[in-house]
Amino acid sequence: MGTERGYIVASLSLCSVYLVYVHIYRSWKLLKTNVLSDENVPGFAYLYIKYVTKAVTRRTGVLYTATTKKHQVVYTVLNCRLETSVLRRFCSAAGYGWDYPDTEYRDIPLCFPEILCRRLLLMVLTDENFRLSPAGLVRVRQSLKTLQPVDELKKGPFTLQVRVLEYRQIDAGVEVDIGLSATSRTRSSVWESVLTLLSKNKLRKAGRCISKNERQPDEPVPENVKQIELRVPRTTGLQCVWSFSDYSPYWLLSLPARLFGYRSHTAPSLWMLSVCLAEIEKHKGLPFAISILGTD
């Protein structure tokens, strides 16, 4: 009996050492450099631990000083490969259809490269020199630019990069601009995006709330413009766990509540942008207005 118990303890100890080495120590060593290979990137488990630790120790809406002399926060991943399964899940969740990648004469969706950068985003937001709390960041603006067809990423290994561009203190808190880019195998820029995130200052008094009677009525849609209503399906939250997992473990941590029937009132902003772009492509050349409605 004692021998069996000793074997069990030894096995558990070896498993613990292995898990710590693979998911913690190895990821910690990889983050010592800013240029990595797609085959050797930090695990999500370690990054989420850093996320929670930083979220607990920092207050939102406060611009902290950098902890080291290396103020620039930038990460680059080389030799990335486009996985068809990831693209298929994205297209299925974003309104393009599950068979979109197999359809001829259709390019990769404009928002898809941001999905490829989701791990890099998490690495940037949990970096010791990132000067904001990663918790509660709100996407307020985003610009997208293609310098070449996004399909260039299919032709071979490509490079992804995410960097912090600028911090700005405003009345509502602190804004940060984060640049995302994808470069082809020929080292020419293919896709660029500037994502602006807001860290709200909860201690600042909120402005006067506008009552329902004071709200301005919606502008009427012109007669020559077709109006399209898109409803947020109940499964959107579950699809976002893998297709739209931005830089926060919120969707992953909220999965148990969603399985028991709880639904958030806010759809992911990247999902809304992707769905709208998909509708624009379907109605190319026709004037129309889009409104997104939540399900009951």
Image: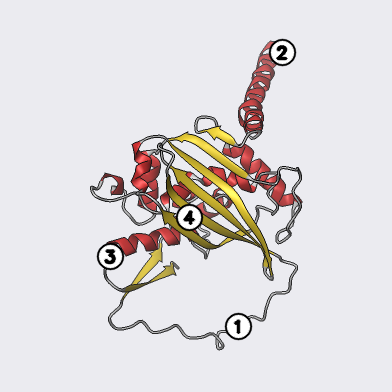
| Mark positioned earlier in the residue sequence (4 or 1) | 1
| Mark positioned earlier in the residue sequence (2 or 4) | 2
| Mark positioned earlier in the residue sequence (3 or 4) | 4
Would you name the residue on which mark 4 appears?
A: 237
Amino acid found under the numbered disc labelled 3: Lys
Q: Which colouring convention does the figure follow?
A: secondary structure
Q: Gap in Å between the C-alphas at discs 2 and 4? A: 49 Å
| Residue shown at 73% from the left, 50% from the top | 56
Could you tell whether 272 is left or right of 21 in the image? left
Whole-percent x, y for residue 17 in the image: 67, 23
| Rendered image: mark on residue 284 | 3
Whole-percent x, y for residue 93 in the image: 39, 53
Q: Residues within 10 Å of mark 1 (few under 14, many from 20)?
A: few
Instruction: Kindly tell me whether residue 242 is visible in this rendering.
Output: no
> Marks 4 and 1: which is nearer the front?
1
> Marks 3 and 4: which is nearer the front?
3
**Quarter where residue 76 is shown:** top right
Q: Gap in Å between the C-alphas at discs 3 and 1? A: 37 Å
Q: Residues within 10 Å of mark 4 (few under 14, many from 20)?
A: many
